[in-house]
Image (cartoon, coloured by chain):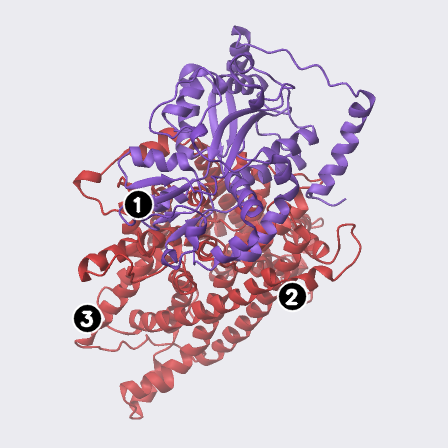
Chain colours: A purple, B red
Amino acid sequence: MRKGFSRRDVLKGSTALIAGTVFAEPVRAAPPPAEAITPALIEAAKKEGKCTFYTAMDLQFAEKLGKTFEEKFPGIATRVERSGAERVFTRIGQEYSSNVHAVDVANTADQAHVIIWKRNGWLAQYVPEEVVKNYGKAYYDPEGFEVVTRVLVSPFGINTNLVKMEDGPKSFADLLDPKWKGKMVKAHPAYSGTIMNATFQIARDLGWGYFEKLAKQNILQVQSATDTPKKIALGERAIMIDGAGYLVIRNKEAGQPVDVIYPSEGTPVATSPSVVFKGAPNPNAARLFFSWMHGREGQQLLIDYARQYSAHKQAVEKPGVRKLSDIKLMKEDPAGVEKGAEEVKRRYAQIFKV
Amino acid sequence: MTVASSESLPRMMHGFDSTKIVLYVFAAVLVVLVVLPMSWLAFYSFTDKDGTFTLQNFATLIHDPTLFDPLVTTFFLATSASLICCAVAAPMGWLVARTDMPLRRTVRLMVTASFVTPPFLGAIAWELLAAPNSGLLNKAFRSLTGASADEHLLNIYSFSGLVFVVACYTFPYVFVLVANALDRMPGDLEDASSILGGSTWQTARRVTLPLAMPALLAGALVAFLQAMTLFGSPAILAIPAGFHTMTTKIWSLFQYPPKPELAAAASLPLLVLTVILLRAEHMILGRRSYSVIGGKNSDPRIIRLGHLRWVALAFCFVVLLNPVFLPYGALLNAAFSKVASQFIWFDNFTLHNIEFVFFELSATRLALYNTFVLGITTATLGTTLALVIAYLTTREAVTGHRALGFLATAPVAIPGIVLGVGLFLSYTRPPFVLYGTLWILLIAFLTLSMPAAYQQMQSAFRAIHPELEDASRILGATRLKALRQITAPLLRTSVVATWCFVFVGTIRELSAAIMLFTSETKVVSVLIFDLNESGDLAAISVLGLIMLIVTFGIVALANRLRIGGGVKFREG
């Protein structure tokens, strides 16, 4: 009779749901056949005429992606619903528990969300042919529940007018130096999926004690990982502790006085998957958009315009962004985040007071 | 109350009285609007996850510092903001109502402008102005004084910054109450004081001030209430500074994993405190009427300030810089600048932000559509409801009209965020799953606008003496015909004014909308809030300016009608 959904309820319900299939059929279900973009799919998508894309991408790129898709397939209006990944997750949860099925395709920056959605039985199985041909096995689910749209890293950023590159912090330990007090901006793990993963990884590798010390540095607490790059570009703070590295690079290439620094302890990383919802109101437009976004064109846009990392093998890298293989990364652990997210939010709120 | 008044007898002889049905229908509507969400709120706050009775939620509220601290913060925020409002609004109200200060009308207009400016928009504009490093005012300060890059004049991301911004958009409440009281205060008493030899100063201190005191106290309470229940400004300024207020805490309790029972428990203190404060205000304002009764009133005395009147004007404009001129300037600057924190100059002027909002931002169209649909529907339905209820209560047309009046006024005690929580709990469950539709927002906005709309329509009806309707009915007209031919034409301008008032109030509502929107039912205020979280200040500025332009258009319309209108409010 209680409304709202807790992780526990979700677990109970979904166990009941999948128990039948799992136990009756211990062998994995055959993966769905890979599907190409066919004229029939395009026709059906155009008939639906619209597609709703919930995403944690930065707004400018998300809209650019939508508009480029519309140009390619005229007659399909793409509406972008942008928020932080954790907010997108909350929103979809609230909507689905009230039987509001508005989302067609979602892109989150937190792998743990896909684990939960899949467990709830909310996701459609769909493997675009393009993905099977061009993506490594690590970057898509052979059962067709998800594809990794982009890989996100959360390095430091600095405003080079306020701090010279060589004087900038080199490590997480450096950030505790009193000279940075009141000069740093940080995003929030209850809003952003990137920051949820980053917080989980930093707490695991450096301990929560690190955050307790960091909290004494009088940081500016914003919400979005896409806001911290803007705050250093404005000159509001000299140093970005975490956030979208790609936006710092984009701003730098647009002539603003900012740069990225990859901390010596390792840079937090989050793979950002997309999914098609089973209850999508526009199932064909959803599949067409999903296919296109993960195809060569969408992924090249991701590299050229958004300055992010693609898993597409044919996509051509554009100089200016450090290769992922050249960055010392922290270890991503979606299952750990799935179990630990509540704890991360709780401790974070205790330490940083918000 | 008794039915056997001379007026109601003839009506009863007409046989079946259709107004009875009207009463029940409207009472039912009001019960659904008010009682249902509040019942769910109470139910949730006193039960645990299995629905059994518990006080655990309140215990948590007191013992968990992440919940209790915001409660304390909110109290200090509301108190400080309220004091500042009084300190600023009282002298301004006096200057405008009782002195020969020049440009008094303009000052009043500017206060109206701060009144209708959405507070969350003001908060964002003040981020642009007074963020410690990138804020325009701090930049100007550094370039004027040559201070180092580390120094700043103002820091909006602080408790005092929040108090300041809240006060900016709350002081009009105090101003209006004080100025109205001074406008209406008869000059005779002051004349008497002067005739008996009191100096201007003595008269002001011993006659005018005591007479205005109840209005000021009431203003202080209203300002306290406003500051306490505000959501947008604290969400925008307090969270970056590292603290919560009660409203932002309630809102954050709905993030995954949602804790509705705690949110409900945290909402109750706000509700109870509001009810108590409104009772207090009622008692204080109730007393005032004794002091101004006294035969035919003369016009209020105007005090000549001499050269001081320019000082007075300067004071008013310095005050008005904060809620109006500076923030509007900052929004305009950000809307046309490539970087929001840079002053516009030839090299960074751009129209791209406007292009982005209208042609690239795919949420714009839907949000504008939703906002206007809701604004128009709420204003139309709200005015109609208020009109009928005000008719029934002022003409005492049906038994039980008092209950109707009470129900229509009751929502004034429900803060927006509390109503949002209540409606969320009521309408996300069968049989009425309204979450995800515009209906739930319509209900929220209707409920929130009902008290003000009802009060406006009530005073409009009181201004029209019932003898006009009686004459019509004696001459054989039915009740409805009398209404149509006599009352309706007299009420037209009040109805339009109320409509505008509700419309403006609806399109700027954030605190209930933030609890109730879904992606399909997003309104402009929520869109602006979303954009603020991702730091898209330029897009906010453009959307905010659109909102302001629409608002001022509607307000201007209402003002024109009122000036040329035929409704005369009863004196005194």
Expressed as whole percent of the image width and height from the top left, the position of residue B244 reads: 52, 58
Q: Nearer the viewer, residue B451 or B69?
A: B69
Mark 1, residue position = A166
Is residue A230 shown left or right of residue A124? Answer: left
Expressed as whole percent of the image width and height from the top left, the position of residue B157 reads: 40, 58
Q: CA distance from mark 3 to mark 2?
A: 52 Å
Taking the view exactly as shown, the residue that stands out farthest to the bottom is B197
Q: At 50% across and 73% down in the image, what residue appears? A: B285
Q: At 56% across and 69% down in the image, what residue appears? A: B277
Within 10 Å of disc 1 (Cα), the crowding (few <14, some 14-19, many 20+) is few
Name the mark nearer the viewer: 3 or 2.
2
Mark 3, residue position = B310
Expressed as whole percent of the image width and height from the top left, the position of residue B155 reads: 35, 60
Secondary structure under badge 1?
helix
Q: Is circle 3 on the same chain as circle 2?
A: yes
Q: Chain of mark 3?
A: B
Tag 1: amino acid: Glu
Tag 3: amino acid: Trp
| Residue B166 versus residue A247 in the image, above or below | below
Q: Nearer the viewer, residue B99 or B565?
A: B99
Name the mark nearer the viewer: 3 or 1.
1
Q: CA distance from mark 3 to mark 1?
A: 56 Å
Is residue B249 shown left or right of residue B217? Answer: right
Q: Chain of mark 2?
A: B
